Image (cartoon, helix red, strand yellow):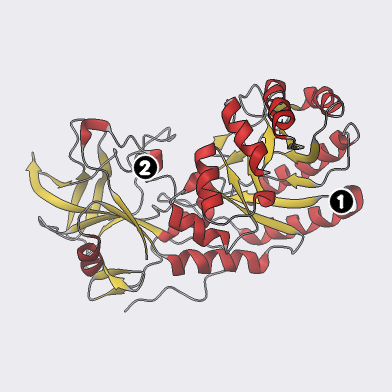
């Protein structure tokens, strides 16, 4: 049995953290064929609670104690996963009232929850005010609905300002700040917004700055974290009350593709320690936090499909499976990738067999985009075998066009 390497540094993401026994992936302590029988049908997403928990705890063991760790639910909002994460992290970051319901049902403390995202509807803002969740203000327009809800409910809304900074997270896979953006209030407009907040009965909490995601460059993350603190200190001079929270964002990347190198966590942690020490002096009442989603859960998940056909077209092998981009849009290359690259994939019941052929793993959809793995070196696979996509714990099920071509939805299990 191949066990995960205990010498791997805390926070390191590896392509295959799952043990292998008698050729089978072992997920949640259960061989893949037995797990598939337990689930009842393919395709399905399986999340290994022990692997995810160990990864989160390893990260927390090296984080400065002054830095709270929040889970960005959008990465994987499966209720069972969220309930598990509530016991592992300090708070949750939400992107909809639907996520808020899952979080509250899971027992999360609303005082440690924040609600971000453009285009929040008045009913969602009202729900957040009623629950006592901190609302990250994305535009002055949202304030009217927040104040109306607070007046109607007799509740003082908790509000932070999401800032669109005048810098970006360099080398970020998805840039979410700097330049014109639909996210947050432009930094130069924030003093006016703060002045307006000071004229109303709200509980001002502080600032949220999320510059980008999927970053594997430690120096870029460190630079953004330092600039975020400087920006917050500058804006605090216009705040109607002391800054009590500063969300430094996240952006820690996962090495999905060949050639990617795992994020070097040590300089990021050292930088956070320095930022926290600086903040103690310059923003003495502020609680600092980072929010991570993908980085916490991606490596603990696997998407499992069954091969339903093996065909050869002009010399090339196609392994046709019962699931595809309708379930796992990111793995197909259609979720923000400029150039399509392969997620790590394998034949889950031949996981330690040597490669014998080059093959492509495709789904059942009537589009050439339905490609889970292209020109992979794999052991010979047959109908009935399991084709698995690793690093599938984040942005899988809920980030995919599940209704496309009306195929059955996949199942999800936490084991």
Mark 2 or mark 1: whose residue is earlier in sequence: 1
Residue 180 occupies quadrant: top right
Near mark 1 (Cα within 10 A), the count class, few <14, some 14-19 or many ≥20, is few
Residue, disc 2: 341
Residue 270 picture location, percent across and down = 73, 60
**117 sits to left or right of 149:** left
CA gap, disc 2 and disc 1? 45 Å
Residue at position x 57%, y 26% in the image: 121
Near mark 2 (Cα within 10 A), the count class, few <14, some 14-19 or many ≥20, is some
Residue 250 picture location, percent across and down = 63, 47
Please tell me whether residue 372 is drawn above or below residue 140 in the rendered image: below
Residue at position x 91%, y 35% in the image: 237
Callout 2: helix, strand or loop? Answer: loop
Residue at position x 45%, y 62% in the image: 14
**375 sits to left or right of 413:** left
Q: Nearer the viewer, residue 141 or 359?
A: 141
Number of numbered callouts drawn:
2
Residue 322 picture location, percent across and down = 18, 46
Residue, disc 1: 285
Residue 174 picture location, percent across and down = 54, 36
Residue at position x 40%, y 42% in the image: 398
């Amino acid at each position: 049995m191949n066990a995960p390497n205990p010498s791997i540094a805390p926070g390191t993401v590896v392509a295959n953290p799952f043990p292998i026994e008698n050729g089978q992936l072992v997920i949640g302590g259960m061989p893949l064929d037995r797990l598939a029988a337990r689930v009842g049908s393919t395709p399905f997403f399986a999340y290994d609670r022990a692997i995810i928990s160990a990864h989160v705890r390893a990260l927390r063991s090296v984080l400065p104690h002054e830095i709270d760790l929040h889970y960005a639910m959008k990465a994987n909002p499966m209720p069972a996963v969220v309930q598990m994460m509530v016991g592992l992290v300090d708070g949750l970051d939400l992107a909809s009232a639907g996520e808020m319901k899952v979080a509250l049902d899971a027992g999360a403390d609303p005082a440690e929850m924040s609600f971000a995202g453009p285009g929040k509807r008045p009913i969602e803002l009202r729900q957040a005010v009623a629950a006592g969740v901190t609302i990250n203000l994305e535009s002055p327009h949202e304030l009217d609905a927040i104040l109306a809800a607070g007046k109607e409910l007799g509740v003082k809304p908790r509000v932070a300002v999401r800032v669109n900074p005048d810098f970006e997270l360099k080398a970020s896979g998805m840039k979410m700040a700097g330049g014109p953006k639909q996210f947050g209030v432009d930094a130069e407009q924030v003093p006016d917004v703060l002045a307006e907040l000071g004229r109303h009965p709200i509980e001002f909490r502080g600032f949220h700055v999320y510059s980008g995601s999927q970053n594997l460059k430690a120096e870029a993350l460190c630079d953004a974290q330092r600039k975020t603190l400087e920006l917050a200190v500058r804006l605090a001079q216009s705040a109607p009350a002391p800054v009590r929270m500063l969300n430094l964002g996240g952006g820690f990347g996962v090495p999905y593709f060949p050639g990617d190198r795992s994020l070097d966590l040590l300089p990021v942690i050292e930088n956070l320690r320095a930022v926290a020490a600086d903040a103690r002096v310059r923003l003495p009442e502020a609680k600092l936090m980072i929010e991570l989603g993908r980085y916490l859960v991606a490596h603990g998940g696997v998407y499992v499909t069954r091969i339903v056909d093996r065909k050869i077209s002009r010399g090339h092998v196609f392994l046709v499976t019962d699931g595809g981009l309708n379930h796992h849009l990111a793995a197909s290359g259609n979720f923000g990738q400029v150039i399509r690259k392969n997620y790590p994939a394998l034949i889950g019941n031949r996981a330690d067999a040597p490669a014998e052929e080059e093959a492509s793993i495709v789904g059942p959809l009537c589009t050439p985009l339905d490609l889970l793995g292209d020109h992979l070196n794999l052991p010979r696979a047959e109908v009935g075998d399991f084709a698995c996509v690793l690093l599938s714990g984040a942005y899988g099920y809920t980030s995919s066009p599940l209704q496309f071509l009306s195929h059955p939805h996949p199942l999800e299990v936490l084991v």
